[in-house]
Image (spheres, grey):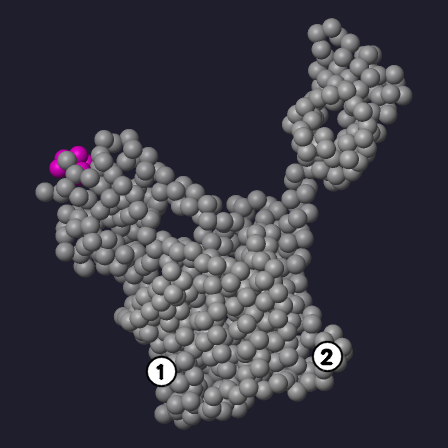
């Protein structure tokens, strides 16, 4: 059965997978190079990463047909590490990122994704889009109108070429056309070759040359943790999207482990940390890719192209890459969130905008997500901390019944004792908790307070409708013998 | 003549208009209606981003085609609904071929030339590529 499934995942769709893999490889090259440049490393680092991650994830991933490689989200997180400590620390951080992700996967933390509300995820993709766009602006500094014209041409081809055919990725056509114009027109403009070296060889196994000290660990750990979280967040989001596009299920914990293993391998082969890519996975599925073979072919063909066409790749003008990145940021941004910003609940909009602002100010996607989750948790607590108290007098007129409705916990009970009338001319009160739930010792303390205040006024207190869990909590904390 | 009618919908006003024509056609020829809603890549991305889980996505999509379902339920026509994934044009054409439908009814967004060049007209694509008659409702 297991063999049968494996066979299906690898060879269930050979023709479609090979073709789509080739398409993805072509579309991956410009992005892998551009993301390397964002991170501040040689183009080879991103290309090796894309090769290694795609190949490894094809075997160990939990979502067949999903494409993982060097990504913008991850590149943006490593900028400072590379600038301050260099490539070797980045490779070490990549390996540590992988280890953290494997631990997450083994601990089955994929479930924790549900604690990231969608307003934070929308803030995340919007912030990512803004940062990718902003990273392109430096390429325009000191450039002439030629740069703007070529970026414009790149974008025009990217968006209009699919009207004629969708068989070839339009980003590739744009890159080829613009590169040809620059080469044959002898246009003097910055190219990939000016940004770093490109070696036409397969990656080799290397142990990052860093001092194995606690200090090193302290330097790379914060980066690795951020990379691990952001990588899993984007990978699991992408997995959900691919699940929906293909109407199939995937193993999220296996995917988390797989992402980790892929990053460990990548780090040892001179590549930067990466994760799943929403855009490329979409291209893969649309081109007919469904199985593991498509991811494998994407990685293998990418490396083949670099080895064969390396001389041409270095001549790609930065204008063409910047154009591709502008397209990536436009398609990453969730435009409907801007259109609907006044229609969605105000707290949701606030969390989304706050997440974006925190990311853009700190340049750290992980911090934005963290802050967004905490903000949402606070808003959620505020929302459910509404407790209503209504009261009625019983027929005989000597007992008042209070109906408490809501969640009783630290955030909701501070004002609760004030909602009762202790100067009432009744013999006893009944506190009806049928529609209330006691969550913590603050809730118990508040009830105690109410009880003692009534006792001071010589009014007997009785509880009714306490649910089982709440009663257990009450007894555990106090063991008070109330009349039920 | 039109025993099996494919009704392509996306929840928009144009597609709601198309429903009425499909119902009349089905009533006249005593046919059945197969409603098809195609979720494209961008919609998938948005739906996943905005929903907490699969159930929510499903509920949202049901909600989207609810006005169409309501109209069909009010009529006496036998109908089925299908949610497909992919590019709308090719998906509708493929479904039409597989189910051997006799007619496709589809709403037109009424794009002008520039818009249809940029966005691509689904109804035109379907009209061009299906073997059966296509009713484009404006």
Q: Secondary structure at mark 1?
A: helix
How far separated are the C-alphas under marks 2 and 1? 45 Å
- Left or right: A44, with A218 as reference point: left
- Packing grade of label 1 (10 A; few <14, some 14-19, many >=20) is some
Say if B33 sits above or below A141 in the image.
above
Q: Quadrant of residue B77?
A: top left
Q: Judge whether residue B59 is colored magenta.
A: no
Residue bearing mark 1? A177
In this figure, what is the number of numbered marks? Answer: 2
Instruction: Answer whether residue B126 is visible to the viewer in this image.
Output: yes
Residue nearest the observer in this picture, A342 or A402: A402
Marked residue chain, label 1: A
Q: Secondary structure at mark 2?
A: helix
- Left or right: A287, with A463 as reference point: left
Residue bearing mark 2? A216
What secondary structure do most residues of the magenta stretch adopt?
helix
Q: Which residue ends up furthest to the right in the rendered image?
A: A456
- Left or right: B55, with A454 as reference point: left
Magenta region: B24-29
Query: Residue A175, image x and y in percent?
Result: 39, 81
For the C terminus of chain A, the quadrant is top right
- Packing grade of label 2 (10 A; few <14, some 14-19, many >=20) is some
Query: Residue A74, image x and y in percent?
Result: 57, 71
Q: Which mark is residue A417?
A: none
Marked residue chain, label 2: A
- Tell me which residue sits at (66%, 63%) in the image: A367
């Amino acid at each position: 059965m297991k063999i049968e499934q494996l066979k299906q995942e690898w060879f269930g769709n050979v023709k479609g997978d090979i073709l789509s893999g080739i398409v993805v490889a072509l579309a991956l090259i410009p992005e892998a190079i551009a993301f390397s440049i964002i991170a501040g490393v040689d183009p080879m680092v991103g290309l090796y990463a894309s090769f290694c991650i795609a190949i490894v994830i094809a075997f160990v991933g939990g979502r067949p047909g999903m494409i993982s490689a060097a990504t913008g989200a991850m590149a943006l997180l490593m900028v400072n590490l590379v600038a301050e400590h260099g490539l070797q620390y980045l490779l070490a951080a990549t390996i540590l990122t992988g280890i953290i992700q494997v631990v997450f996967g083994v601990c089955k933390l994929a479930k924790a994704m549900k604690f990231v509300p969608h307003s934070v995820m929308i803030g995340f993709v919007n912030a990512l889009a803004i940062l990718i766009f902003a990273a392109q602006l430096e390429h325009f500094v000191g450039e002439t109108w030629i740069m703007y014209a070529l970026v414009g041409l790149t974008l025009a081809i990217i968006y209009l070429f699919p009207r004629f055919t969708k068989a070839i990725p339009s980003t590739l056509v744009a890159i080829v056309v613009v590169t040809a114009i620059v080469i044959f027109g002898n246009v003097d403009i910055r190219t990939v070759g000016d940004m770093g070296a490109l070696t036409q060889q397969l990656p080799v196994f290397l142990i990052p040359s860093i001092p194995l000290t606690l200090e090193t660990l302290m330097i790379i750990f914060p980066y690795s943790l951020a990379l691990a979280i952001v990588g899993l967040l984007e990978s699991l989001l992408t997995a959900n999207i691919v699940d929906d596009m293909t109407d199939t299920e995937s193993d999220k914990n296996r995917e988390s482990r797989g992402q980790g293993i892929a990053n460990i391998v990548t780090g040892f082969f001179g590549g930067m940390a990466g994760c799943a890519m929403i855009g490329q996975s979409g291209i893969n599925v649309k081109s007919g890719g469904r199985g593991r073979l498509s991811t494998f072919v994407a990685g293998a063909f990418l490396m083949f192209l670099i080895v064969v066409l390396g001389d041409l790749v270095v001549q790609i003008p930065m204008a063409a890459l910047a154009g591709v990145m502008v397209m990536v940021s436009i398609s990453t941004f969730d435009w409907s969130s801007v259109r609907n910003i006044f229609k969605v609940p105000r707290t949701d909009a606030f969390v989304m905008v706050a997440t974006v602002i925190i990311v853009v100010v700190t340049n750290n996607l992980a911090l934005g997500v963290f802050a967004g989750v905490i903000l949402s948790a606070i808003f959620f607590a505020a929302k459910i901390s509404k407790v209503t108290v209504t009261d009625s007098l019983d027929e005989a007129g000597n007992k008042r019944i209070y109906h408490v409705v809501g969640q009783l916990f630290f955030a909701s009970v501070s004002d609760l004792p004030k909602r009762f009338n202790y100067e009432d001319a009744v013999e006893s009160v009944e506190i009806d908790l049928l529609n209330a739930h006691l969550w913590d010792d603050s809730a118990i303390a508040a009830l105690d307070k109410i009880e003692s205040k009534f006792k001071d006024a010589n009014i007997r207190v009785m509880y009714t409708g306490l649910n089982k869990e709440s009663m257990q909590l009450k007894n555990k904390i106090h063991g008070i013998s109330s009349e039920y | 003549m039109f025993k099996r009618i494919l009704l392509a919908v996306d929840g928009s006003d144009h597609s709601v208009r198309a429903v009425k024509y499909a119902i009349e056609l089905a009533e006249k020829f005593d046919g059945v209606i197969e409603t098809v809603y195609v979720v494209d890549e961008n919609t998938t991305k948005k739906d996943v981003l905005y929903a907490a889980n699969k159930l929510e996505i499903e509920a949202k999509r049901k909600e989207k085609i609810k006005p169409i379902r309501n109209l069909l339920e009010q009529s006496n026509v036998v109908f089925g609904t299908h949610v497909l994934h992919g590019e709308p044009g090719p998906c509708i054409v493929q479904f039409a071929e597989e189910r051997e439908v006799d007619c496709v009814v589809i709403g037109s967004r009424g794009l002008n030339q520039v818009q249809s060049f940029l966005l691509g007209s689904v109804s035109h694509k379907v009209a061009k590529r299906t073997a059966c008659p296509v009713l484009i409702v404006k």
